[in-house]
Image (spheres, rainbow, N blue to C red):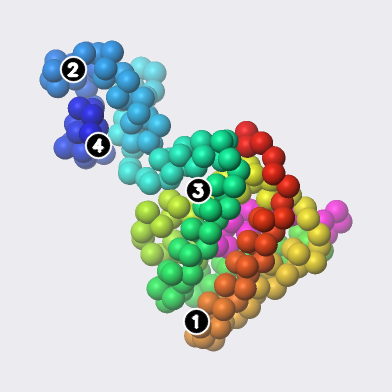
Amino acid sequence: MSEFLNYLASNDRLDERIPPLTELSQQLGVSIAILREQMEVARALGLVEVKPKTGIHRLPYSFKPAVKHSLAYAIQTNQAYFSMYADLRKHIEEAYWTEAVMLLTRQDIEQLRGYIRRAQEKLSGEPVQIPHVEHREFHLSIYRRLDNLFVMGILETYWELYEAVGLAVYTDYSYLENVWNYHEKMVDAICAGDFSAGFHALADHMELLQERSRTTPNQKFE
């Protein structure tokens, strides 16, 4: 790691003051110009933020910024990379399904049902609205209690770039209806304690999404 990243890792208290670059330069034996470059890397990784007048602040560790920047670059060069990433996301959700749903509380399950109700209201309204936010939050809410920031970093990045590659657009009503029917089956199975049936509903739902990803026209990522 760079000197600046080593410094951050060795002094990982969020409330600890990070000295200005002039002071750090003397402390670490590195020029200010090199430190600035190293700090920009840390900013891109979401490890620090720099605010006018208040200086450099450490941020809680998150896996998402590194994954998001890397995937965004990959999609810019070849949009087929998103399909590969979507396949990774599919396997992660399936692998963690049972562990995740066993941790859900009654309140969590009611929240999942709330997303389904809001999505159905949007789909039955005039005009029809795409329940993209509900779709994202439905899936992420199932896995949040895992308390695994690497799993969540991968899943959150998927949803942030899902819209950018053109998947959060209207296709046809029957497709959207199918998606939310699967979501309802998943929650019904969780409530019944039949995690295997819930898993099969998830897997079938994922195949529906994978098929849509393969047939969505390519467009330049921006």
How packed mark 3 is, by other alpha carbons closer than 10 Å (few <14, some 14-19, many 20 or more), is many
Check if residue 36 falls in the magenta segment.
no
Q: Earlier in the sequence, mark 4 or mark 2?
A: 4
Label 4: element kind = loop
Residue 31 position by quadrant: top left
Q: Are marks 4 and 3 in contact (CB under 8 Å)?
A: no
Q: Which residue is mark 2?
A: 30
Answer left or right for 102 relative to 9: right
Q: Which mark is residue 195?
A: 1
Give the amino acid type for the residue marked by disc 2 in the picture. Val
Q: Position of residue 180 (x, y in %)?
A: 69, 68
Q: Nearer the viewer, mark 4 or mark 2?
A: 2
Q: Which mark is residue 15?
A: 4
How packed mark 2 is, by other alpha carbons closer than 10 Å (few <14, some 14-19, many 20 or more), is some
Q: Which residue is mark 3?
A: 157
Answer left or right for 136 relative to 89: right
Check if residue 136 falls in the magenta segment.
yes
Q: Earlier in the sequence, mark 3 or mark 2?
A: 2
Q: Earlier in the sequence, mark 2 or mark 1?
A: 2
